[in-house]
Image (spheres, rainbow, N blue to C red):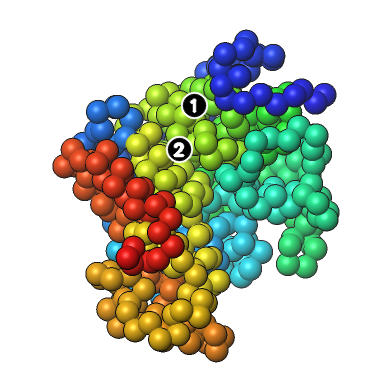
Amino acid sequence: MTVPETSVTDSAAAPATRAAAPASAPDVPPSHPRQSEFGFTVGTRLPNGRGRTGVIRTPHGEIATPAFVVVGTKATVKAVTPEAVSDLGGQAVLANAYHLYLQPGADVVDAAGGLGRFMNWSGPTFTDSGGFQVMSLGSGFKKVIDMKAADSSGGDDAVAPGKERLANVDDDGVWFKSHLNGDVHRFTPEVSMGVQHQLGADIMFAFDELTTLHNSRGYQVESLERTRRWAERCIREHFRLTDARVGKDYQALFGVIQGAQYEDLRRTACRDLGAMPFDGYGIGGALEKENLGTIIGWCAEELPEDRPRHLLGISEPDDVFTAIENGADTFDCVSPTRVARNSAFYTPHGRFNLSGRRYRTDFTPLQEGCDCYTCTHYTRAYIHHLFKAKEMLSHTLISIHNERFVVGLVDAARQAIEDGTFDELKERVLADYYAGTGDPQGL
Ligand SMILES: [Zn+2]
């Protein structure tokens, strides 16, 4: 069963070892009348024709794109109030259906009036389908984007070292064990849609199967076909729930493009799902960092131009520029708050760790010139002290700065596309960030 993995370049050059499923007319209604309550308008394009600015219109406001979507996995941006997220320029928040389904339960969020009202965030919201967490926590692989080149020795039943397999996929859905208490749960496309309708976010994602770079090509082909059939089921259930849940705001549904590192599979997925009445698309699954731009580019070439594209889970400034340049309109990432809890802070000259002794008496802000709440009120010495004293406020203050840094970076990229200076900005920002001066002020 196991076929040796090939890299992107190999697969592009060599004939496919196994043909992808042919595109066929999707078994779904052509559209739903309420889809007009969600919209996307393309603004200025980069000369390469893929990267672009735009505006996403939702019932809870507009998102100017490219946009960084702040992650609030459990209906909270860790250690940061919604007011602070808004003040630092965050336009939208993304929560996770899997976590909220387990705790507190989608029925609780529904009874509260939906995700935004529950967490006191008045702007646009996203939920991801839960598929990523069901399957990545299930196999013990928490990260797929930064995976090194595939190791084919793992095979299709691979689990991370020391981990028990907690998720099992079949054609109808997934059985998985809760990471909280080991209870067994069942997710299907219909269950995911039901959960996400109860959560009430403006933008939802179709339930898809996550594969890893460890899976064989044969398995990727099989999985892609399963994700295509699940996409149809998601649309049918989504339209049914849209009709059934009278009086609710329209929730947009994005299809998720899988296909790992294989050009033919990614393009097939784009054509299959592109022919379905999704409101937008997520680019998901196994991506090697060095092929990120190539894979997004294939998707941007194939997907309908008039629908937004979300890149699920990227992290570093170079990834941000690569994603925007190749046609991603929105993306999300947990890194700004995750690294903050380990006292790491972003600056234009790289990422630094505030736990170092040299910050004990450094009475400058985290980043000179930064307009965020943290940098306009506090010093490195103070936050260093909070971190060392294990005071929770250090997480809050560093998280606010880190979110502001990434949001600001993407805002600058958006402006640069409008101004025709994207390449210059990218070159300058990346040169400074990766110069390795070892000093956050670049002195
Ligand atoms: Zn700051």
Query: 73 or 116, which is in the foreground?
Result: 73
* Mark carried by residue 281: 2
Indicate the position of residue 373 as horizontal and vertical percent values: 31, 77
Q: Which residue occupies 52% across, 66% down?
A: 339
Q: Which residue type carries mark 1?
A: Cys
Query: 268 or 125, which is in the foreground?
Result: 268
Q: How many marks?
A: 2
Image height of 23 relative to 396, above or below: above
Placement of the C terminus among the 4 image quadrants = bottom left
Image height of 171 relative to 240, above or below: above
Crowdedness near tag 2: few (<14), some (14–19) or many (≥20) residues, C-alpha within 10 Å: many
Q: Check disc 1 and report the residue beneath it.
A: 270
Q: Is residue 111 visible?
A: no
Q: Is 215 displayed left or right of 124 in the figure?
A: right
Q: Quadrant of residue 144?
A: top right
Image height of 391 relative to 214, above or below: below
Q: Are marks 1 and 2 in contact (CB under 8 Å)?
A: yes
Q: Which residue occupies 62% across, 10% down?
A: 15
Q: Which residue occupies 51% across, 73% down?
A: 343
Indicate the position of residue 103 as horizontal and vertical percent values: 63, 68
Indicate the position of residue 62 as horizontal and vertical percent values: 28, 53
